[in-house]
Amino acid sequence: MKITFIKSDVLECLEKVNSAVSKKNTNIPALEGVLITAKDKTLTLTGFDLEIGIKAVIKDDIFVQEEGAVVIAAKLFADILKKSNDERVTLQDEDTTVLIQSGRGKFKLPFIEAKDYPDVPSFDETNSVELPAETLRSMLSQTIYAVSDDNNKAIYTGSLFKFVDSELTVVAIDGFRMAVRKEELPESANFEIVIPKKAQLNLLKIIGKFDSKKKDVKVKIISGKKHVAFRVENYTIITRHLEGTFLDYEATIPKEYKTSAVVEVVKIKDSVERMSLLSQSDKVKSPVKCHFSDDKIDFTCSSTMGKADDTLEVTVTGEDTEIGFNNKYLIDALKYVESDEVKLTLNGSLAPMIIGPKDGDSFLNMVVPMRLS
């Protein structure tokens, strides 16, 4: 194999692909490297850790003199490119080593045969849908915070993607919080899958590469019986979708409420953050108490560090309610909202609080309260 490429082009793709390179000691040394394939006037970079695979295909400014494929140390390859003093880089294999040359700088690295690199899964398509990348970025950003990290309940270490006709709903649950986001789609689809958090994080990283103002960038979601792929421009992410029964989230959303208030997101988040200052060093987090009355919400927090009070003037409808929350869970539910105002609805001091839009149902954040002594 012998190929010449532009350093910045490959380095940008390598950064994304290396997210899928195995960081753990495995019985397959090849997985700690990146697969570099030169074929048909293109360069393909592949990272795979047996959970998620990421491929980047580069076609511009690629000169393939000899086709071939090798696996080399992923981080070292990236570091060499970062330190090279010339934009044009040549890579070629020589017996048991790879020569990387840029300007007068030369590196010789051992490589692993491409045949020893496990195949990234391929699968038959059962469903597919395409949507704007910016729409999906917004949906993931507003829900991924509520994905569980508890592997004992594996199904909740991912988000539910539910396609019904021309609407997509993304749902994340961790037992203390629930985040739901809906969006109309440009095309119709009817299927549902649960996507692991790791794949979503990598997808957000790739989408972030493209200017959010570029409305023409699309993401194609391709689902099979056990796997799902996301294609964005020259990138492809492949992962297994999680198997199991996801909670009937709609049944957990109350149809009526006893108390409600419309609040400015910035103001309520600031109030909760001020209360949180007293519980930062506590091993057992003190709840932020929220007392909803006719024309205000009173916030209080008591800990070993002291006591804090704050008041937010708002119009409260319905019954007076005092309720307590873990400050982090409440802040997260507010931090990822993309609107200026939200509507808070409650059903007493023990039921979860719902944070939703002032009008409509485009998103919903649910926070489970802490029991007050």
Image (cartoon, grey):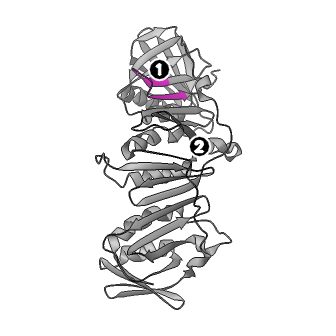
- Quadrant for the N terminus, please: bottom left
Q: Position of residue 102 (x, y in %)?
A: 34, 83
| Residue with the most extreme right position | 152
Give the magenta-colored segment's residue range: 355-366
> Looking at the picture, which amino acid does disc 2 mark?
Val
> Looking at the picture, which amino acid does disc 1 mark?
Leu
Q: Nearer the viewer, residue 190 or 10?
A: 190
On residue 214, which mark appears?
A: none
Query: Is residue 285 in view from this perspective?
Result: yes
Query: Is residue 278 in view from this perspective?
Result: no
- Quadrant for the C terminus, please: top right
Q: Describe the element under mark 1 as helix, strand or loop.
A: strand
317 to 337, vertically: above or below: above
**How many numbered marks, from 0 up?**
2
14 to 274, vertically: above or below: below
Q: Is residue 265 left or right of residue 321?
A: left
- In terms of image quadrants, where is residue 5? bottom left
- In terms of image quadrants, where is residue 172? top right
Q: CA separation, marks 1 and 2?
A: 28 Å
On residue 194, which mark appears?
A: 2
- In terms of image quadrants, where is residue 352? top right
Q: Nearer the viewer, residue 339 or 206?
A: 206
Q: Residues within 10 Å of mark 1 (few under 14, many from 20)?
A: many
210 to 320, vertically: above or below: below
